[in-house]
Image (cartoon, rainbow, N blue to C red):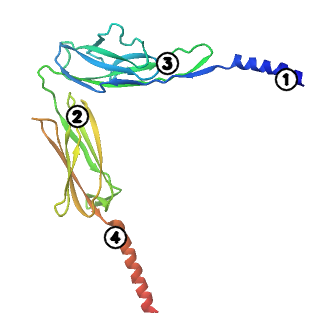
Amino acid sequence: MGKKLFFILPFLTTIYFLLTTSSSAQAVSLSLSPTLTEIAIKPGISTSIKYKIENRGDPAIVNIQILPFDTNQKSPVSFSLDNSNVKLAEPFFLKNSDSLEVIVNLQVPQESAQRDYYYNFIIESQPPPSQEGTANLRAKISLKSPLLITVTGDGEVEIKPKISLFEITPKNKINLLGFKINLFNSFERVPVVLVVDNKGKNLIKPRGQINVRGPFWQSRRYEIKSENVLSESQKKISLNLSGFIFGYYKISANLSFGEGTPSIFASTSFIVLPIRITVFASAVFILLIFLIYKFKKS
């Protein structure tokens, strides 16, 4: 038996090393700045933009692309890199702890329509080629930096906003004689949904307030942070209001889009009642009446 094991163990060890492969994992950590670029440019003009790529992980093979948001849309703007060692859509090697400044040249043809054009500056790591007998755990990441271009000949932009939806979504909605009543329990969260439509050819930046007025001259204000609403699109803004005890409240949204632009307005209302306390008090009252009746009867 001992002699058999003496021959079998070396045989099994040899088979194990022949049939198994080693594995290696790659740690990829890239950063891209700026994270958003907005420019306004005249037709027939060219300009350049700087991006910085940093590799904080293992050495990586990186690819750069600039693609429109809608890949089916024909792009009038042309792009090229002002780097001697890097080209668009051609992979290049980036060492660990290394950085690269990329200069993007863009050209807007004279005949380009005056409107917005949206692109993504994309960097994507590619898995390294696997060596024979080694299984790579291939890490792959992709980073995007939106590039928002406004083509305008005289600096004017088209601002055509609309509030398409401003509503409260309560758990309890009552229809009374054709009127819709938004009913909430005391201290319950009040979810508010605001949808802003952009009907124009240029992006807009709505900013403003949501004002709440209630009984006894109660007044609250909630700021709406400025966010981009791209051309011919919409933006949904959601808020959760709280701290209301009792009464009828009117809520309004006021939005503006910069100096000299029109403001838009919408309003709705809701009612807050101590429903749970009322139900509990009613149950206690009915129970007391029942007990008093039983006591008198006995």
75 vs 175, nearest the viewer = 75
Distance, label 2 to label 1, CA atoms, is 80 Å
Instruction: Please say whether residue 69 is visible from this viewpoint.
Output: no
Q: Earlier in the sequence, mark 2 or mark 1?
A: 1
Label 4: which residue? 278
Q: Earlier in the sequence, mark 3 or mark 1?
A: 1
Q: Is residue 215 left or right of residue 273?
A: left
Distance, label 3 to label 1, CA atoms, is 43 Å
Q: Earlier in the sequence, mark 3 or mark 2?
A: 3
Residue type at the position of mark 1? Leu
> Which of the numbered marks, if any, corresponds to residue 198?
2
Q: Earlier in the sequence, mark 4 or mark 1?
A: 1
> Which of the numbered marks, if any, corresponds to residue 127?
3
- The mark closer to the camera, 3 or 2, is 3
148 vs 243, nearest the viewer = 243
Q: Is residue 218 left or right of residue 30?
A: left
Residue type at the position of mark 2? Asn
Residue type at the position of mark 4? Thr
Q: Earlier in the sequence, mark 4 or mark 2?
A: 2
Distance, label 3 to label 4, CA atoms, is 64 Å
Distance, label 4 to label 2, CA atoms, is 45 Å
Residue type at the position of mark 3? Pro
Label 1: which residue? 5
